[in-house]
Amino acid sequence: MDEMWEIIKAQQEQINTLKKKMEPAIQPDNNNEVTVLKHQTSVLAEEVEKLRTKLFIPDETKYKSTYGLGPAASKVYQTSQGLSIGGYGEANYQGLIKDKRSGNNNADFERLVLYFGYKFTDSILFNSEIEFEHSTTEENGAVSVEFASLDYLYNPMVNLRAGLVLMPMGFVNRIHEPPFFFGNNRPEVERTIIPSTWSEIGVGLFGELYPGLTYTSYVVNGLDASGFSSQGIRGGRQKGSEARAEDLAWVGRVDYAPEAIPGLSFGGSAYLGNSGQARSFDGQKVDVFTQLYEGHMQWKYKGLEFRTLGSWGHISNAAKLSAAKGETIGESNFGWYAEVGYDILPHLIPTTTQYLAPFFRFEIIDSIASAPDGFDDDDSRERRIFQVGLQYKPIPNVVIKADYRNFDSAKGNIADDVNLGIGFIF
């Protein structure tokens, strides 16, 4: 950046010199010289303006996932300097089938997200995600900061990050841009058991220890158990908003992508920490030690895409929480899913660059896998979901989706649904 400023200064000096030459040249018999000098001055002025702009709004970069973030969220890492702007959006229609007592058909512009990044130097940068949900804040919508952090890039093995950080768990919590997951809705396992999108205030390290072997490790403010429910820990997220930090937590992740098997990657993550946050439950202050683990694997081979993920959690002092809240809070919870899709379009149109993939996903979720002593299980929280759909990308940045979900609950009825939607990144 310093070199670019020197270039700008030098070209500005050339412009000033040319202007001085023009002053005595503006005579009736020097019209040709004046014309040449004006042209040279104009060209230099344009170049200076381009350089000034490039310092703050650099050229468009290629989409590439970096440090586990989505391709659009990673633009600042491919930027040489200055400002980067990206984002994504998704809109969908949901039509309920059978048991419509549980809701209504609806159409929603679900999310519009903007990424703002700024590279101060080659080693210091800022990155952020601002999300607008459901079009307006007047109804059920909201505007929130999903992440906002400073990175210090020391070397490929060790880098520092601090701020509001995404929890490095699962697939979707870090990469949730619509062209990069199947279906209009994110997997329920990664909403219920892993409560994505999930971010907290924290600081930690990340990097690549060996080709293909990456890690992330943060210390963050802990969850707030006062928000736990029979549906899981989702309500305990604090999202960096005046978060209670009486209890801290650790979250870490490791992934490996072996060079010998292109397209294969696997790994796992863990979250450990107290969630009591110095609150009283059933007349006592308790630690509410919370554990969450997950393992995952994905394989992309030619047109084939396969993913699987399993997650298990445990909550201590669940009996006291249940008594205080008047509902059964699971002592343990778990979820698992597998999905497969295949791009069939190259077999139909060999020269195409477009994408058309039918897919199938199966999920099992139980937010009360085991109830605390003295409390009844709630079988309505045990569910199986069968999902089939079609994903079409006319270009890599844009996706059109259609899917059908069949919900099977151990107790009670949940409406099946048909979903149609669009998504994009930029």
Image (cartoon, rainbow, N blue to C red):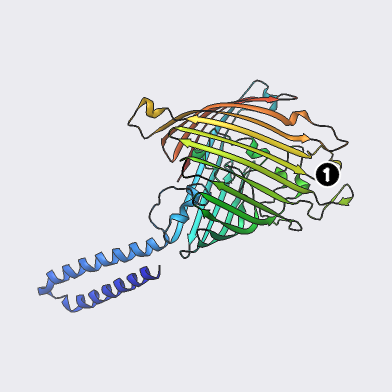
* Disc 1 element: helix
Say if 413 sits above or below 320 in the image.
above
Q: Is residue 338 left or right of residue 324?
A: left
Q: Quadrant of the N terminus?
A: bottom left
Q: Which x, y percent locates residue 117? A: 50, 57
Q: Is residue 406 above or below residue 157?
A: above
Choose top left, top right, bottom left or bottom right for residue 240: bottom right
Q: How many marks?
A: 1
Could you classify mark 1 by the number of other residues whose Cα lies within 10 Å: few (under 14), some (14-19), or many (20 or more)? Answer: many
Relative vertical location of residue 107 with respect to residue 142 in this rendering, above or below:
above
Q: Position of residue 398 (x, y in %)?
A: 44, 38
Q: Is residue 192 left or right of residue 10?
A: right
Apparent side of residue 124 relative to residue 170 in the rendered image (left or right):
left
* Residue 304 pos. (x, y %): 47, 32
> Mark 1 = which residue?
321
The picture quadrant where one finds residue 298 is: top right
Q: Which residue of the protein is positioned furthest toward the top in this rendering? A: 98
What is the x, y in percent for residue 160?
57, 61
Q: Residue at x 45, y 59 (%)?
A: 83
Give the residue displayed 29% in from the left and 63% down from the top.
Answer: 46
Q: Residue at x 60, y 35 (%)?
A: 187
Quarter of the image for residue 183 reads: top right
Viewer-closest of 418 and 346: 346
**Above or below: residue 374 compared with residue 275:** above
Residue located farthest toward the right when viewing the structure as drawn:
283
Q: Nearer the viewer, residue 407 or 129?
A: 407
Query: Residue pushed farthest left?
Result: 29
Q: Amino acid at mark 1?
A: Leu
Q: Of 175 and 99, which appears nearest the observer?
A: 175
